[in-house]
């Protein structure tokens, strides 16, 4: 199983970014997928998850600002991040719950 993230970068507070995770070697359509993040000196936390049926969950701090979605035809999971805040700064990781596999991570930096 391989997960490759893209879409991170530097953005000003209030801006938007869209992260993408391309999966291979997994039965993507049946996998629950998630996005985690880890800020310096903090534990990795689950930001959002989406089941094979499309049900979603979010950590309270991103509700109403972030949207997770999936495209089973492209084996891709997306994280649309709007109204970004400096506290969203972290390395964001894609995670396959079925195979418990991580991507390499993509840096998101939000300047104030």
Image (tube, grey):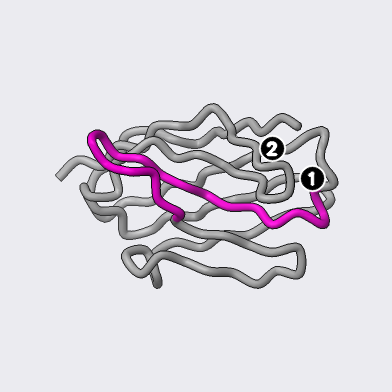
Residue 111 part of the magenta segment: no
Label located before the other in sequence (2 or 1): 2
Horizontal and vertical percent position of residue 48: 50, 59
Residue 54 versus residue 38: which sits nearer the camera? 38
Classify residue 61 by image quadrant: bottom left
- How packed mark 2 is, by other alpha carbons closer than 10 Å (few <14, some 14-19, many 20 or more), is some
Name the residue rendered at 55%, 33% in the picture. Answer: 6
Labelled pair 2, 1 in contact (Cβ < 8 Å): yes
Image quadrant holding the N terminus, namely top right
Q: Is 91 on the left-hand or right-hand side of 69? A: left
Cα gap from disc 2 to disc 1, whole angstroms: 8 Å
| In-image side of 90 versus 6 (left or right) | left
Residue beneath the point at 60% across and 50% down: 78
Rendered view: 75 above or below 66: above
- Label 2's element? strand
Reply yes or no: does residue 33 show up in magenta: yes
Read off the residue under disc 2: 22
Foreground pick, 44 / 37 = 44
The label shown at residue 101 is none
Q: Residue at x 29, y 39 (%)?
A: 39
Q: Which residue is mark 1?
A: 74
Query: Can you give x and y, in whole percent of width and height, for residue 76 in the image?
Result: 71, 46
How many residues crowd around disc 1 within 10 Å: few (fewer than 14), some, or many (20 or more)? few
Q: Which residues are magenta?
A: 28-46
Q: Say what secondary structure mark 1 lies in.
A: loop
Instruction: Please give the name of the residue rendered at 65% of the width and 42% of the height, measured from the top-left corner.
Output: 100
Relative image position of residue 23 (x, y in whole percent)? 73, 38
Position of 50 compared to 67: left or right? right
Give the quadrant of the C terminus: top left
């Amino acid at each position: 199983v391989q997960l490759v993230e893209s879409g991170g970068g530097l953005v000003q507070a209030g801006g938007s970014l869209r992260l993408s995770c391309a999966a291979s070697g997994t039965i993507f359509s049946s996998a629950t997928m998630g996005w985690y993040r880890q800020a310096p000196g903090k534990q990795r936390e689950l930001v959002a998850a989406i089941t094979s049926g499309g049900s979603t969950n979010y950590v309270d701090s991103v509700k109403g600002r972030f949207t997770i979605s999936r495209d089973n035809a492209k084996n891709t999971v997306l994280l649309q991040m709007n109204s970004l805040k400096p506290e969203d700064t972290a390395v964001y990781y894609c995670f396959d719950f079925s195979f418990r596999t991580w991507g390499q991570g993509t840096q998101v930096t939000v300047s104030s």
